[in-house]
Amino acid sequence: MSRVDSLTYILASILSILYPIYGAIQFYKGAIAWWLPWISGEEVQLGVKVGDAYIPNTFPDPFSGIILIIIGVIFARSIYLSKRDPKLAEGFLFVGWILASMMLILNLVVLAADILDTYYPLVWGGEIEEPWTLGSDPWGISPHLILGIIATPIYSKIKHLLKQLIP
Amino acid sequence: MRRLIPLAFLGEGEVGTVVEIRAGRGLTRRLLAMGIAPGMKVRVLKSSGPGPILVEVGQTRIALGRGVAMKVIVGGWDAWPM
Amino acid sequence: MAHVKRRMIKVALAGNPNVGKSVIFNNLTGAHQHVGNWPGKTVDKKEGFHKVDDRVIYIVDLPGTYSLTALSVEEVIARDYIIYERPDVVVDIVDASNLERNLYLTMQLLELGANVVIALNKMDLAEKAGMRIDHRKLEEELGVPVIPTVAPKKRGMRELVDKIIELAEGNPRGHGGKTLCYEPRVERFIERLQGEVASREEVTKLLNPRWVAIKLLEGDEDVIKKLSEIEGGREIIEKGMKLREEMGRELGDPEVAIADARYAVIKGIVSRVAGELKRLTASDLLDSVLLDKYLGIPIFFVILWWWFQMAFIGSAPFCDILGDGFAALGEALTGITGHPFIDYLFFGEYGIIQGIGAVLSFVPLIMLLYFILALLEDSGYMARAAFVMEKAMRKVGLSGRTIIPMIMGFGCNVPAVYATRIIPDEADRLVAILTNPLMLCGARLVFFSAIAAAFYGAYAGDILFSLYALGVVLAFMVAIILRKTLFRGRVSPFVIEFPAYQKPSFKVAAVRMWDRGSMYLRKALGIILIGLLIIGVLTAIDAETLTFTTDPERSLVAALGRSLAPIFTPLNWDWRFVVAMIFGFVAKEIVLGASAMLYGAGEEEIASRLASLYNPIDMYGYMTFILIYIPCIVTVAAIRQETGSWKWTMFAVVYGLILAYIVNLLIVTIGHLLLG
């Protein structure tokens, strides 16, 4: 009786692979940068270069890496359950979408904050140290943003749950 | 012969009717205030391994530690294990 | 050839049509069955065997009937078999999804006095229909064993066979359990007639007295015929008819009255035994995921991390704006009063204006931390988080709810101490209050991040994280020790209500944010100002001449520092560290500014200046001291207020100092041992 169709589960499968991959990259880079600086980690990037930025841009942060991996596991769990317990699978899909969207919003907030941080001196005629570019931003368009966008179509499949929850 | 067992021993999905609360005044009062009172039907929602259990009384959902759940005595009527 | 004598158990299967009787029959007999005819009738007779150990269970599948009147061939066959063939056990197959109607036959089997075992079949369908049946309660209500079965899946077959054997060998031909009484008005007639019947031995040998009584009152022709053939039967018939007439006058048609009586009992039983199955709501579904055994805690950490990232990064620009703004203000106003002391005090680099600016620059962060926390609480999630963390938290001596003030402590310890109100148990609450100062608050972060950047370069993030972690680990250790010593054995009862999930209200969140955040604000503008003034005075007054001096080395506070310095030599502290630490008691934000002033450097350069003068290990040790020792004076005030006792407040201060000294010493000693 589930509204989630196989197309959605294909999407979830893609996410359940991409999230852990990017999470692992970020963890790896972060671990090197934070704790093992003597290992030279090449600039590992898995994305398209646009201008001076990568899309998505993986930045070194072991915790955000772990977070991404966890989200991937949640999607994987929903796929694993899709045959055995479709209702519960929907639940995990729902939570996965919520978390993916939260990360999406976070990334946007980060970008906005960084831009604001760069340009606020202008308000009283101060100087800008260096102009902001997507490439110079520590986060940039990170996997949090891209994968969050990819996860958006899931909304239409689980929105009945949201409506039930919040009448 | 009614089977009386502590709430902590009910499994997931099982329902019992509260018979007695064997606790100090403070805890008893709190439980009563939340709806866990003699005569009320309690259904166990989550109870896996050690750690607190989640029950449903009426329309309210309450989480109880195992220690607390041991103090609530229910008429342990199992429902069909699905 | 030894012929093993097999004990035979005679079993009859009864039940409504279409309840799965034949499936069960097939399950039990398999290939050992035979279809014939009931003698003299055109109805199929199915019989078969089921062998278990040294027993043979001979099974007859009675025709499906809705009741046991005399009106149809099937019914007569069924009841005759039970009366004359006297099966050891009658298995009544009841369709759980049609309970009331099926129990009607059960009632009559019980009236017959048969040895009944109920096979409660089609339980899966009942559940799909939204009914949940408590089979053990049904057992109690009826007084006969009830075995749940799902015939097509062969579930319950073994239990059924076991029960059959148990009943056959333990209770031959007796009445299974209790006598179900009908309503008193009907029961009166039954009992009167029953007494009559029971006194005739010839009848009771063959037939159950109660059943005879009921049948006579119903006017059952078949029973009347049977009775007339037994010695003494006619008198009973006569009595029966008289009572039947009487009953008719009182209650109307006796057959109807008795049927009604049966249904009344059935309705009562069903109401006590069957319940509405709750549909799985979205809220339940969400809880199943958020409280999942494996993913529950990881999900919590995801949300935790998100919360901190949003707050820190989101507030950063505003913090910077405030900081810059006040710095500029201070510069602009310098020299306005013309009086060097006042100037220094208010507009100097470590003056009041700068102090206010430094404090206010933390406000956006703290406000955002509390705002998002309020949203999370309002949504209903935090109760689930407390549940999920309870087990883990107990292992380190804390209650699940403690996670919330702990997290708040990372913003500012003052509101976090007030937040321990949500912990109901006193012992738990005290432990939470006493360990909260170990949570690295925003004020200490000021000092630490500056030092970390200057001293440790690329490792700065790592160092900061290690300080956070150290605080948390020490908090756990202290909690466990406290639990084992002072608060031994008083484990609090964990009771938390799960509110319904709801869309968090921004308005409510804003109010709570203001509530908690403004506490920090008030502290900042209150005590810190006074503290800064005091510091200003102490540092600018010459210890000997008591006049204004710009040389900190000659000031009052320097004298104080020098006199205390010997205590701290094992920690490799300079007397200035001592002074800064004393200032830190007022407010931890000041430590950096105080150091700056003591070294005659600006706040921007102080970190690098320190880096050039001191060794990273010693500095790390110093940072841990700052992390652990007495909370700032406002926190002390909060602790006093929330514990209501000076004893615990003093305890918090003293143990903080001692623990800080010990840890600092350990780090410095071991650090130098390992790294030179």
Image: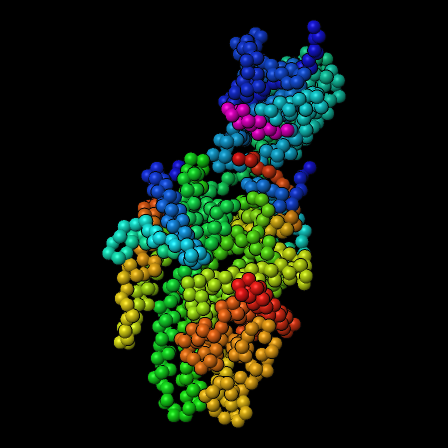
The image's colour scheme reads rainbow
Q: Is residue C220 above or below residue C667?
A: above
Dividing the picture into quadrants, the one containing residue C353 is bottom left
Q: Is residue C113 magenta?
A: no
Which residue is at 51% across, 28% downward? C122
Dividing the picture into quadrants, the one containing residue C103 is top right
Which residue is at 64% across, 60% downward? C481
Dividing the picture into quadrants, the one containing residue C239 is top right
Residue C402 image point, x, y percent: 55, 60
- Using residue A3 as the reference point, say whether residue C128 is left or right of it: right
Which residue is at 48% across, 91% downward? C548
Q: Is residue C147 magenta?
A: yes
Q: Farthest residue toward the top?
A: C1
Residue C219 image point, x, y percent: 61, 21
The magenta stretch spans which residues?
C145-156
Q: Quadrant of the N terminus of chain C?
A: top right
Q: Is residue A20 above or below residue C651?
A: above
Which residue is at 26% across, 57% downward? A52
Query: In this view of the protein, can residue C409 be seen by the observer?
Result: no
Q: Nearer the viewer, residue C575 or C526?
A: C575
Query: In this view of the protein, can residue A151 be seen by the observer?
Result: yes
Q: Farthest residue toward the left?
A: A51
